[in-house]
Every structure is written in C-alpha cells, then in structure tokens.
Amino acid sequence: MDEGTFQPRFPWVGGDLQTIRNQLVSPRIPLDSTGTERWEVDLSDGSGDRLVVLEDRPRTAVPNASTVVLVHGLTGCDSSFYIQEAARHFLAAGCPVVRVNLRGAGPSRPLCQGMYHAGRTADFAAVVDALGARGHERLVVLAYSLGGNMVLKYLGERPDQEGIVAAVSISAPIHLAETAERFVQPRNRVYHRWLLARMRIETLAARDGQTPEVVRAIEKSRTVIEFDDRVVAPLNGFQGASDYYARNMALPYLPKIKVPTLLIHALNDPWIPARSYLAFPWDTHPSLTRLLPKSGGHVGFHGRDGVWSNTMAERFLVERGALAA
C-alpha cells in the first residue's frame, strides 16, 4: 500500500495538531443505523465483571458483510471521537458495527472492579466468543492505540482462531517500554499530565472502589511509568512495570499472526516511537502489511477527505476479501 498518500487537512498540520484534534473538535457523530443495541459480556474469571458492548446495524446492509469490531485505546470508550467516526464510516459501507468497552472503560466502568490493560487478551476473547454466539461468524477488527497492542497480541497468541478474518491496528504501541519512555519526555509533559489524570480517574472509579493501599499508590504515582509500576502491574500479577511491558507488548507476537493484518502508524506520532515499526522484517511475514506515512500524529490522520486511516482500512479489507463473504 502507498505510504505517501496521506495529506493532512488544514489547519491540522504536524503530529501534535493531528493528535489533539480529536479533543479540540469532537462533536458527537450521528450514526446512520437502524438503532443501537446495548448488551453485556460476562467475564468468566470469577470477578463478576461485565463488559458493555454497543451494536449497530446499517440501514442499507451489504449481503454477507463482515461485522466490524471497534476497540478503543487507553482512557477511551465507545463514544471516543475516533471510535464514533469509524462506526459512521463502516455503517455507511453497509457493515454491522460493534463498539467494545473494555474492562472498566466507559459504560463498563460501574460493572467492573478490574481494569483493562495492554495485554488483557482473555477479555477480548470473551467478546469474540459472545459475538459468535450471537451469529456474527465473520469479524474484522479495527483497534486503536493500547487496544491495538492488545488485539495484535491476541492474534499472535491464537493464530488458528476462526472468528476474525482480518484486522487493522492504528497507532499501536507495539513496544511498550519504548512508548512509556517517550511519553515521559519533557516535550510530552502536557500530554503526560492529561493522560495520567484520566488514568487515575478511571482506576479510582472501580465498581467497589479501591483499597487504601491502591489509593495511596495512585496518589504517589507522578508518571505513567510509576503508575504502571505501582498500580497496573501489582493489580494484574506482574512484577513491576518492566515485567508488565515485556510480557504484554505485541512486537514478539507479530510473526505468529496468520490473518491478514494492517498496521497503520505515523512516523511523527508524538507518543509512540517508530523505531520498532521501521526495524521489523515485514517482507518475511506475508500476513502483515505496514502503512507508515510521514504524518498523521497519534490516532489522528485527519485528511482532506475525512479520516484517512478509515479509508485505508476499508481499502485493505476489501482487497483481502474480508468485508463480505
């Protein structure tokens, strides 16, 4: 695929403006569907946690169209601008669309004690199983940022799964430690302060609250790395941030992926370094396709004709025969 086709829409020029555009201009996007059905996925880990899923069907359906499953990133949910915009795009293309709220995110938050993390693939497996039980036999997945890392890891862990016929990741932090180090750099201090505040709010809003020890750990964490080390890692059975990053980053799972998968990442993403994308041996893994434009920011790609990543995702899925049976 052509990596040089992205042209940013004025005035959203450069990685930072592409990145913050979702927050500066993020109206609710009307979805042209026959209605939104809300349902829940019970998680079988004994926690009692449940995920909220929103399902929309297009007014003009394409026969035998695959279901498009959308997975948000860190501190996102079904109403995030990029999720709504992707839902609008694929509903217009005639596909059913499912928006997943991961454990503890958005409307799943009051139903969950635990929280999603970069490698919590068992939760996504429960969603895939639930979709199959509801008659969605062919799935394509678009996953963003942290959710993209999780879905890529899932596909590498389960190379012979049958429900997902193709996938697209957008701005996924495939090397978590490199991403964390980039995020705490001085040039990202405004992003860092904003994201850390949202992480604290999410975690403190657990169904049954947090223990005093966890609350103190949250309050003492001054960086996302400290937060991962003191909060995310111990709550999920990891030996600190380094162990959490090493065991959950998608990079070592990429060679095991068998379904056609497109990875979109902007070289000027201010949050996620491009080093691992540039160093990966793409030519030796035919199931994987890279798209690394020079610009686009983090989950941005606001182009002259809409959100370019949606257009390229649809083109890839059509070329691979994944959008219709």
Image (cartoon, rainbow, N blue to C red):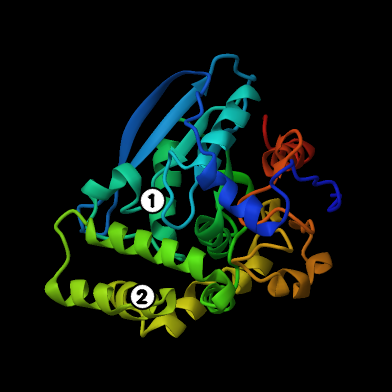
As helix, strand or loop, the secondary structure at mark 1 comes to loop
| Point 53% across, 56% down: residue | 151
How many residues crowd around disc 1 within 10 Å: few (fewer than 14), some, or many (20 or more)? many
Kindly identify which residue carries mark 1: 102
Which x, y percent locates residue 130?
Answer: 39, 41
Q: CA distance from mark 2 to mark 1?
A: 19 Å
Query: Which corner quadrant of the image does residue 197 belong to?
Result: bottom left
Residue 20 versus residue 128: which sits nearer the camera? 20
57 horizontally vs 203: left or right: right
Kindly identify which residue carries mark 2: 227
Which x, y percent locates residue 118?
Answer: 46, 65
| Point 43% across, 78% down: residue | 225
Which x, y percent locates residue 2?
Answer: 86, 50
As helix, strand or loop, the secondary structure at mark 2 comes to helix
- Is residue 38 among the parts visible in the rendering? yes
Mark 2 touches mark 1? (CB < 8 Å)? no
Amino acid carrying mark 1 in the image: Leu
> Tag 1 or tag 2, which sits nearer the N-term?
1
| Point 75% across, 42% down: residue | 316
Of the 4 image quadrants, the one containing the C terminus is top right
Which x, y percent locates residue 172?
Answer: 59, 60
How many residues crowd around disc 2 within 10 Å: few (fewer than 14), some, or many (20 or more)? many
- Is residue 170 among the parts visible in the rendering? no
147 horizontally vs 45: left or right: right
